[in-house]
Amino acid sequence: MLRIGIIGVGAIGERLLNTFLQHEEVEIAGLCDQNQERLNAFKSQLPDVSTYTDYKELLKDDKITLIYLAVPPKYHHQIALDIISTGKHLLCEKPLANSLAEAEEMASAAKKAGIVHAINFPMVYSNVFHLYKEKIQSGLIGELKKVEVNFQFTEWPRQWQQNDWIAGREQGGFIREVAPHYIQMLQYILGDLQVTASFADYPEDPAKCETGFISRLETANGIPVLFNGISGIGQKEHLSCKAYGEKGTIDLVNWSILSESKKDTNSEVLDVNREKQFDLVHELIKGTKGETSLLVDFDEGVKVQRVLEDLLHQ
């Protein structure tokens, strides 16, 4: 039984909490949040689970095997170091930290402690993503010429994410919140990316996050990867990651749709097997048992953080 403590039960923390509850080999042992009303709401659902407003009190529970850290990025660094010092395994929300230096210190500490360390990048566990990867790496679309990533948001923050920090410049914005998923996916497929130019648009209020950005990255062998994002537009949210090859294109749309085109055909939505997908929780269980597992570790998180910082500060 994998006994889990969760630090941070906001919208994102609750989403993975519900995933944990679906697994027979997992027990939720403790919940921590500074919002007591939020904890009270979960207490009615999970009466046997201990609740805390101070994460250090949760860490004193020796029976907890793994901590899921789901607080805003600004607070990852110190809390993660405190978790690591207890020897508990750690699953952290993305991005890994709020700076490259913090991310590097967290990765170094986790490796020295010998714990399982992973980041919640859910696309790695979907068959949609693995088919996308296969289409590119196998050469089915021919020699890769370019990748374009587009983020189009009706509003930011989105309706289900309304809070001050995610709207703020210090640790929020869609570059920090959404771009890491695509950086991680593309580096998983293409290898390390380097930012060659990046331009972000900001409102007059210095506390508010970006309203748009355009960035150019490239792979080690010079394939261009373009990022283009905007918020506050009269259009339904649309996300796209399109790879252009000499024989065809493959487009990952809104996380779960694959669209393919060839020289002589129109774009066609592919039928993707939705069964027997990888599962983050199963992979965590395997990892904590010392078995080979598919996890995005803190080393990958550092690589994502390096690109993320260049997107923001180039």
Image: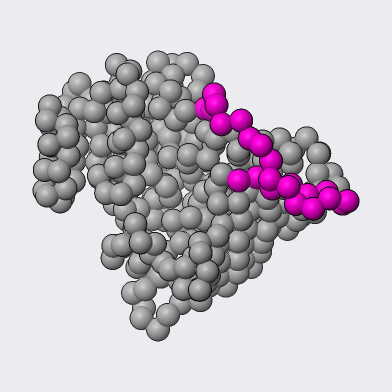
Quadrant of image for the N terminus: top left
Q: Residue furthest toward the bottom? A: 204
Res 87 seen here: no
**Foreground residue, 8 or 287?**
8
Q: How many marks?
A: 0
Q: In this view, does 284 lie to the left or right of 195?
A: left
Residue at image position (73%, 58%) is 224
Q: Quadrant of residue 49?
A: top left
Quadrant of the rendered structure where residue 208 is? bottom left
Residue 268, compared with residue 154, is above or below; it is: above
| Residue situated furthest right in the rendering | 264
Residue 77, image x and y in percent? 32, 48
Give the color scheme: rainbow, by chain, secondary structure or one colour.
one colour
- At a point 79% along the width and 53% down the height, the residue shown is 266
Q: Position of residue 239 (x, y in %)?
A: 56, 57
- Relative placement, left or right, of 307 versus 143 is left
Viewer-proximal residue among 251 and 193 = 251
* Above/below status of 212 relative to 190: below
Residue located at (33% from left, 18% from top): 25
Q: Nearer the viewer, residue 84 or 175?
A: 175
Image vertical order of residue 306 relative to residue 125, above or below: below
Say if residue 31 shows up in the picture.
yes
Above or below for 281 versus 209 = above
Q: Is residue 270 magenta?
A: yes
Q: Quadrant of the C terminus?
A: bottom right
In magenta, the rendered stretch is 257-278
Residue in the image at 88% along x and 51% along y: 264
Residue 206: % across, % down: 36, 78
Q: Position of residue 270 (x, y in %)?
A: 69, 41
Whether residue 118 appears in magenta in the rendering, the answer is no
Q: In this view, does 111 lie to the left or right of 186?
A: left
Q: In this view, does 240 lie to the left or right of 93?
A: right
